[in-house]
Amino acid sequence: LLQNHVGSIYLVIDRWLAPFAYLYLGIVVVWYDRGKIWRSTLEFIHLTKSHTGQYLAKVTVDCLNWFGLTKRYVHGSQPCI
């Protein structure tokens, strides 16, 4: 369903510290299609480095590349990545 969607796709990204000091990043996508709001968890990433903005951006882009979502457009004119 998501691969055929032609409208906007929104990212929900959350980073948190689990017990015993493990860092994780959750990436969820949300989209509207056929009169319904859809959501799907793309990835639950165990972070292995210091959580700088550059590192978080890299793992996010790597995830979007894996799912083929880096070619999506925002407002139909500007690449989102």
Image: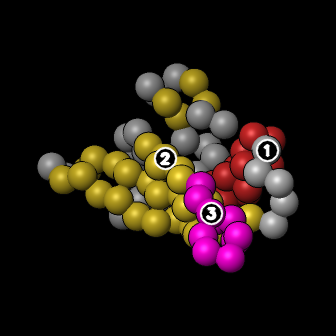
Residue type, label 1: Thr
Question: Secondary structure beneath disc 1?
Answer: loop
Q: Residues within 10 Å of mark 2 (few under 14, many from 20)?
A: some
In this rendered view, identify the residue nearer to me: 30 or 52: 52
Residue linked to disc 1: 52
Q: Residues within 10 Å of mark 3 (few under 14, many from 20)?
A: few
Q: Position of residue 32 (x, y in %)?
A: 28, 47
Q: In the picture shown, does residue 45 fall above or below 63? A: below
**What kind of secondary structure does the magenta stretch mostly adopt?**
strand
Question: Secondary structure beneath disc 3?
Answer: strand
Q: Relative to 26, is 8 on the left or the right?
A: left
Q: CA distance from mark 2 to mark 1?
A: 19 Å
Q: CA distance from mark 1 to mark 3?
A: 14 Å
Range of magenta residues: 15-24
In this rendered view, identify the residue nearer to me: 34 or 12: 12
**22 in the magenta segment:** yes
